[in-house]
Image (cartoon, rainbow, N blue to C red):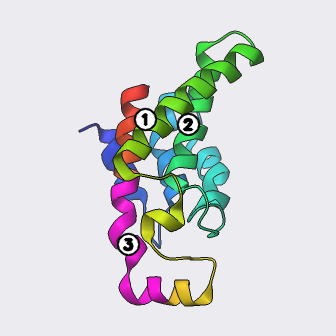
Amino acid sequence: MSRRVERAVELFGPDKCNCSQAMAVAFASAVGLEETAAMNAGRGFGAGIAAHGLTCGAVTGAVMTLGIRAAKLTKNEKDAKTKAYEMAHRFTERFKARHGTLGCKELIGVDLATEAGRKLNADMQITRRLCPNFVRSAAEIVDDLL
């Protein structure tokens, strides 16, 4: 297991990074990004984009990381965009094959956009129990793609 994968899992937690930040920070040095910039970029994407349960934050953090890497592998914006889409497509297909969806709400089985969902999550520690697995999975795939 790569140190970056382990670091992504270690960074994730309620008093640490959200899922998107954990991915972006763990891979920052691999793509030439300052960790502070990675932390800031991923801040609003946790819990499915600001806790709306949309695209999983580990997925958005992974796609950001791959997009930065794509820019370093190409010479112009058109090629970078094409490469980023290719890498993101490979990532998302592999993530969906493992987990069936890219959606946070579907992955964790609770709607964090509602007060009832947030209470259920707090009472049952759903994100603490399930999300480290999604972060690990996303990190393994990114590590392989890089």
What are the residue bounds of the magenta stretch? 120-134
Circle 1 is placed at which residue position?
142
Camera sees residue 13: no
Under circle 2, the secondary element is helix
Q: Is residue 75 left or right of 139 when viewed as pictured?
A: right
CB atoms at circles 2 and 1 under 8 Å apart?
yes
Of residue 37 and residue 120, the one placed in the foreground of this image is 120
**Which residue is drawn at the image coordinates 34% and 46% (left, top)?**
98
Could you tell me what secondary structure mostly forms the magenta stretch? Answer: helix
Q: Earlier in the sequence, mark 2 or mark 1?
A: 2
* Residue 53 x/y as whole percent: 59, 67
The residues bearing labels 2 and 1 have C-alpha atoms spaced at a distance of: 8 Å
- The verdict on residue 45 being magenta is no
**Which residue is drawn at the image coordinates 33% and 71% (left, top)?**
129
Label 1 is placed on what type of residue? Val
Circle 2 is placed at which residue position?
65
The residues bearing labels 3 and 2 have C-alpha atoms spaced at a distance of: 23 Å
**Which residue is drawn at the image coordinates 34% and 39% (left, top)?**
140
Label 3 is placed on what type of residue? Arg
* Residue 128 x/y as whole percent: 38, 72
The residues bearing labels 1 and 3 have C-alpha atoms spaced at a distance of: 22 Å
Q: Earlier in the sequence, mark 1 or mark 3?
A: 3
